[in-house]
Image (cartoon, rainbow, N blue to C red):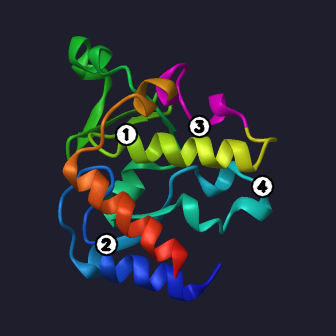
Amino acid sequence: MSLNFKRSLRVYNFFDLYTQQIISIGDRTIEHVLPVSRIPRQAKNDPSNLFVISRKINSFRSNYRFGGHIDEIYSCPHRYEEMGKCFRSTDKKIFYPRYGHCIIARVGCHMLNKYPHLHEEDFFEDGVIDQWNKRNFTPIERWIYDLHVDLLRR
């Protein structure tokens, strides 16, 4: 993967994928949507899996799987930590992003299809990828996704 792709992504995309907040260039980092620690070597630098998020959210997310059952968070809030309207359960090792669901689901489907030895349950709670794939893009998600696709084509 080209260093130019990472550089372009960091310069041109100023929205955090998971919070949809604008982030300063100094706080931007490249996120592997499917954690690099859980994917094979040949998939680690797949640019389809790389997006911009803030350093704090990247650290907060760790390499947790994605969860989408948000009702559980509101019924037992003491079991979850919050940052930037994103939640995580350290017990379950699940991360609940506030935004980015459509993009995350599409990236997940792409990576699972491209690398058939990957397993959905290693990255998503049961049913989450299907649930998120049925959602409509928010305007900011659409902008992030279209920019990403444009940068991939360059």
Instruction: Give amino acid for label 4.
Output: Pro
Q: Is residue 12 left or right of residue 51?
A: left
Circle 4 SS class = loop
Name the residue beneath numbered marker 4. 40
Amino acid identity at mark 2: Asn
Among numbered discs 3 and 1, the one appearing first in the sequence: 1
Question: Circles 3 and 1: CB distance less than 8 Å?
Answer: no
Extent of the magenta region: 119-129
Q: Residue at x 42, y 83 (%)?
A: 8
Residue tagged by mark 3? 123
Q: For the residues marked 2 and 4, what is the alpha-carbon distance in whole angstroms? A: 27 Å
Q: Secondary structure at mark 1?
A: helix
Q: Do labels 1 and 2 touch, CB within 8 Å?
A: no
What numbered label is drawn on residue 118?
none
Q: Position of residue 125 (x, y in %)?
A: 52, 25
- Upstream in sequence: badge 2 or badge 3: 2
Q: Which of label 2 and label 4 is nearer to you?
A: 2
Q: Which mark is residue 13?
A: 2
Q: Which residue is labeled 1 in the image?
A: 101
Determine the CA span between mark 4 and mark 1.
23 Å
In the figure, is residue 115 to the left or right of 88?
Answer: right
- Distance of label 1 from label 2 (alpha carbons): 17 Å
Which quarter of the rendering shows the N terminus? bottom right
Give x and y (percent) for residue 49: 56, 58
Residue at the limit of the structure toward the top, as seen here: 75
Q: Amino acid at mark 3?
A: Phe
User: From what the image shows, is residue 149 above or below residue 69?
Assistant: below
Distance from the alpha carbon under mark 3 to that under mark 1: 13 Å
Q: Is residue 92 visible?
A: no
Mark 1 neighbour class, 10 Å CA radius: few under 14, some 14 to 19, many 20 or more:
many
Residue for point 24% across, 50% down: 19
- Left or right of 81? Residue 120 is right
